[in-house]
Image (spheres, rainbow, N blue to C red):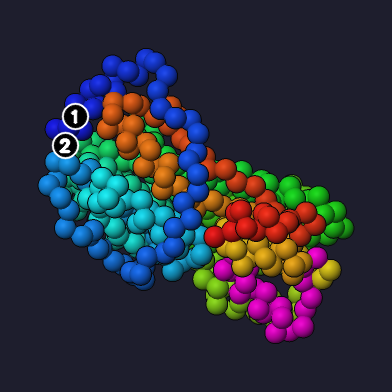
C-alpha cells in the first residue's frame, strides 16, 4: 500500500496547482457506539483483512470514549467508518494520556500504516512523532483536536473551532445583561485544544470587565463527579455565584447535581445560569426544558470527512483546504427547538 500511496502522492504534487478535492463537510454519521468501547488504554485491531494491497492501513489514536458523550459518538463514528468493508485495515487506540498516545503512535509508524489519524490529548510534545511519520511516508490527519505544529507536518485537519466556541459562548453570556458575573469556571483537561479554546475567551472577558469575576476556576478534567465536588465546595464556602461555565456537558451535569442537592435553582427561571459544551442529546433536552441555559455545540461527526480526504489523497487529489471546521453553533433555552435537539443531539 505504501508503493501505491507513493504513486498517488506524486500525482497529487502534479495536481497541486489546480483546485482539487471537496470543500463541503459530508453528512453526519449517526452510527451507534460499538460494543467494545470501554478502554481508557486499549489497542484493538480490526478483524483479519483481505490481502493488504487492497486495503488502506490506518492507525486511529483517540481519547477515551468514556470521557464524555461527545467522545463516545466521535469514537463510534470512527470505528463505523474505518472498516474492512470500506477499504481499510484499521487499528484503534484510546487513551487520555499524551505520553501513552505518543508511544502508540510511534509503534503504528513502525508498523508502516499508510495514515495516522490523530486526536491528540495534548497540543504539544508531538514533534518527534510528526518527523518520524514524515520520514516513514506515513501521512497524518488530525481530527477533533489540533497540534502546535507547522501545517506541512500533517496532510489535513478536521476539527472544531474551539476558540470560536469560547467566543460564541462568552458573547451569549454577556448578552444576558447581568449586573455582576460571579462565575464558577470548571475547566476540561488542561492543555487540550478544547480546554484552551473554551477557557481563552472567558479569561479575556474576566480580565477586561470589572463586573466579571471568578469565584473559582478549577479543572475537573472532564469528570462529572469532580465537577460536582468543585461546585459543592463553593456552596459550602458561602461564596455568592450566579454562573456555572462548564467546559463539557458531563461537568455541567455534575455541577447541577450539587445545585439540586442544595436547593439552588438554575436554568431559564432560576438563580444560576448553567452552560455546557458538546453534542449530548440529553444536555440539549435540558436546555429545551429550561433547566440549563446554554449548550455550545461541538460536532463529533468527523469520520466521513476524514474518509473522503483519504480517498482523495489515494486518488491523487490534494485536500482543497488544510483545515476543515465542522459546522457548529450555540443553543440557548430561549430559542432552542425540538427539531434542533433531533438534528444535532447525539
Q: Is residue 328 left or right of residue 179?
A: left
Q: Residue at x 44, y 30 (%)?
A: 22
Q: Is residue 280 left or right of residue 323?
A: right
Q: Quadrant of residue 15?
A: top left
Q: Could you tell me residue 70's position as x and y percent? A: 51, 60
Residue 105 visible in the shown view:
no
- Disc 2 marks which residue? 2
Q: Could you tell me residue 176's position as x and y percent? A: 82, 54
Q: Is residue 68 left or right of residue 319?
A: right
Q: Nearer the viewer, residue 169 or 229?
A: 169
Q: Mark number for residue 286?
A: none
- Disc 1 marks which residue? 6
- Is residue 226 located in the magenta-colored stretch of the structure? no
Q: Secondary structure at mark 2?
A: helix
Q: Residue at x 68, y 46 (%)?
A: 168
Q: Residue at x 54, y 60 (%)?
A: 346
Tell me the crowding category of disc 2: few under 14, some 14 to 19, or many 20 or more residues within 10 angstroms, Cα based. Answer: some
Q: Nearer the viewer, residue 296 or 46?
A: 46
Disc 1 from disc 2: Cα separation: 6 Å
Q: Nearer the viewer, residue 255 or 52?
A: 52
Q: Is residue 248 left or right of residue 12?
A: right
User: In the displayed structure, would residue 208 be above or below residue 255?
Assistant: above
Disc count in the image?
2
Q: Could you tell me residue 201's position as x and y percent? A: 65, 48
Q: Secondary structure at mark 1?
A: helix
Q: Nearer the viewer, residue 98 or 305?
A: 305
Answer yes or no: do the residues labelled 1 and 2 have beta carbons within 8 Å? yes
Q: Which residues are magenta?
A: 242-268
Tell me the crowding category of disc 1: few under 14, some 14 to 19, or many 20 or more residues within 10 angstroms, Cα based. Answer: some
Residue 281 visible in the shown view:
yes
Quadrant in which the N terminus is drawn: top left
Amino acid at each position: 500500500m505504501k508503493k501505491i500511496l507513493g504513486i498517488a502522492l506524486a500525482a497529487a504534487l502534479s495536481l497541486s496547482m489546480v483546485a482539487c478535492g471537496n470543500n463541503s463537510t459530508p453528512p453526519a454519521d449517526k452510527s451507534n457506539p460499538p460494543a467494545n468501547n470501554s478502554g481508557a488504554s486499549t489497542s484493538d485491531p480490526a478483524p483479519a483483512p483481505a490481502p493488504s494491497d487492497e486495503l488502506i492501513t490506518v492507525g486511529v489514536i483517540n481519547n477515551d470514549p468514556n470521557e464524555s458523550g461527545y467522545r463516545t459518538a466521535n469514537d463510534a463514528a470512527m470505528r463505523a467508518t474505518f472498516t474492512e468493508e470500506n477499504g481499510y485495515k484499521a487499528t484503534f487506540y484510546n487513551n487520555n494520556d499524551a505520553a501513552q498516545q505518543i508511544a502508540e503512535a510511534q509503534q503504528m509508524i513502525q508498523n508502516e500504516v499508510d495514515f495516522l489519524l490523530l486526536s491528540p490529548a495534548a497540543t504539544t510534545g508531538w514533534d518527534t512523532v510528526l518527523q518520524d511519520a514524515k520520514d516513514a511516508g506515513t501521512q497524518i490527519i488530525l481530527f477533533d483536536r489540533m497540534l502546535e505544529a507547522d501545517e506541512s507536518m500533517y496532510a489535513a485537519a478536521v476539527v472544531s473551532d474551539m476558540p470560536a466556541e469560547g467566543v460564541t459562548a462568552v458573547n451569549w453570556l454577556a448578552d444576558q445583561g447581568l449586573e455582576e458575573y460571579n462565575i464558577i469556571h470548571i475547566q476540561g483537561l488542561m492543555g487540550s485544544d478544547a480546554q484552551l479554546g473554551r477557557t481563552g475567551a472567558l479569561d479575556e472577558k474576566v480580565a477586561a470587565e470589572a463586573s466579571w469575576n471568578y469565584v473559582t476556576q478549577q479543572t475537573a478534567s472532564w469528570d462529572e463527579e469532580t465537577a460536582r465536588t468543585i461546585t459543592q465546595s463553593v456552596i459550602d464556602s458561602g461564596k455568592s455565584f450566579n454562573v456555572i461555565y462548564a467546559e463539557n456537558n458531563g461537568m455541567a451535569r455534575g455541577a447541577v447535581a450539587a445545585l439540586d442537592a442544595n436547593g439552588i435553582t438554575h436554568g431559564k427561571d432560576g438563580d444560576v445560569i448553567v452552560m455546557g459544551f458538546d453534542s449530548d442529546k440529553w444536555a440539549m433536552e435540558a436546555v429545551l426544558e429550561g433547566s440549563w441555559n446554554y449548550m455550545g455545540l461541538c460536532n463529533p461527526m468527523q469520520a466521513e470527512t476524514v474518509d473522503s480526504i483519504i480517498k482523495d489523497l489515494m486518488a491523487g487529489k490534494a485536500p482543497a483546504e488544510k483545515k476543515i471546521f465542522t459546522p457548529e453553533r450555540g443553543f440557548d433555552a430561549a430559542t432552542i427547538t425540538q427539531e434542533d435537539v433531533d438534528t444535532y443531539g447525539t
